Amino acid sequence: MIRRTLGRLIPVLILMTFILPSALAQYSVQGGSVAPLLAVDDSPNRLQVWLVNGTSDVSIRCTASADAVWKRYSSKALEAEVVADGISQEGSVSVLSKVNDGYGYFVEEPGVLPRYVWIIDYGRHAFRAESVGLLQNDNPCYELWLSGSSDALPMIYFTPIGLRRELQRSFEISYNTMEWSEASRSYVIVRAKHSIEGDPFEQAFPPPLFDTEVALQGDLYGRHFGMEQSYVTETLNAVAIEARIDTIVTRNEAPNISNQGSGFSAPLYVSFRPAANEPVANWFRWTIYHQEKRDTIRAATVRDMDFSFTEAGTYTIRLEAADRSRRCFAIDSISIAISESYLHVPNAFSPGASPGVNDIFKVAYKSLISFNGWIFNRWGAEIFRWNDPAQGWDGKKGGAYVSPGVYFYVIEAKGSDGKNYREKGHINIIRPKNVRDQVIQ
């Protein structure tokens, strides 16, 4: 018996699936000083909320027969009352031309699932603020608040089952601020815009990084009806700070610097500059900390700082920036590693034999903070001296190549790690006989 009943019900349910969606009442809202605005389309509740500006000539139109009954509700569709006035029929369209603010309207017709239209007269709910200013809050370094109030009536509507909801207003707040530009490597002035919903006097915004007025526009429903309000505050003296470390590194790019060890080769010269939202940021303090020694090796309250790193280790460079009142601070830090020292001396080269290939006597090195080198012939006479490890001897004396053979070097150096070097040894000069410009020593 149950199986036979289900067999009869299934075709009916399938038929209803295809019929019901097309048997929904369809509405349009017309009239008012400006075209009505669909503010909410709540499909699950079959409800649309429309804003109009004035209701005197607003009408709701629905495809329905002359037998259809118009109803309205104020809080729940089950408690709806019949609307008797202002109804006309235009062919297959039923027209309700007498509507009021704060009601939900619908057509009741046999076999048709009703939809609902809620009317709000925006003219009666338009946003106007008593005054708009800047609120003195406890966290001006991180938050911006507007002060003010509005006596605008809330835009309330009810779903057909009686759920109370409020149509949230939208606003735009804008002001000048600054943001970091990778292209210019600096903070540049931009116009910040924030779109918000709800009460603009109960929300916090990112604080500006530049002295500026703050503009409030809204609500944005009013923009549709030509009733949008604009307010501008007095000038805000910005206190919020953003800062980061910008560096100019001057390092030796000599090809004979070894890749031994990790970090930069000493000496490393670095110019530290603050990238901040100046002139709001106008106080800067630098600290250089040696991590392994756990020691501060430099602290200075200056805008720009230059420093030469000559000792191996890892350093933390910290920047503190503050505003004019020293109320707000920003901190940034970076790390710089200086390698331990390294020195390797070759024992042969071939000047003049193949230009650009092993034709200069150079050491391979890293992080040497002092250097002196001498070249002697086999009789102990000095032929060449140099004090820059990036340089070397080209195998000449007096502008001419010396003869091939054995020569001697002495090198004294000191590394970034405190290591002292004193290297002695011989150099073999290998040269073909067709190189004529030689001086016999």
Image (spheres, helix red, strand yellow):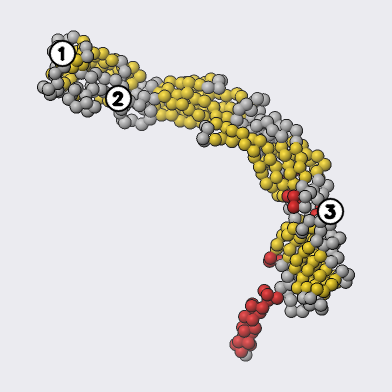
How far is disc 1 from disc 2 in space, using C-alphas? 30 Å
- Residue at (31, 31) in percent of width and height: 259
* First in sequence: mark 1 vs mark 2: 2
Residue 148 appears anywhere in the view: yes
* First in sequence: mark 3 vs mark 2: 3
- Where disc 1 sits, the SS reads strand
How far is disc 3 from disc 2 in space, using C-alphas? 83 Å
**Kind of residue at badge 2:** Tyr
Percent coordinates x, y for residue 12 in the rendering: 65, 83
Percent coordinates x, y for residue 200 in the rendering: 73, 44
The mark closer to the camera, 1 or 2, is 1
From this view, report whether residue 44 is shown above or below residue 279: below
- Specify the quadrant that holds the N terminus: bottom right
Judged left or right of residue 254, residue 228 is right
Farthest residue, direction front: 91
Percent coordinates x, y for residue 216 in the rendering: 73, 42
Residue 124, numbered circle: 3
- Residue at (18, 20) in percent of width and height: 427
Q: Which of 64 and 239 is in front in this view?
A: 64
Residue 311 appears anywhere in the view: no
**Kind of residue at badge 3:** Arg
- To which residue does mark 2 refer? 365
**Kind of residue at badge 1:** Val
The mark closer to the camera, 3 or 2, is 3
From this view, report whether residue 121 is shown above or below residue 133: below
- To which residue does mark 1 refer? 439
**How many discs mark residues in the rendered view?**
3
- Residue at (12, 22) in percent of width and height: 434
Q: Nearer the viewer, residue 308 or 250?
A: 250
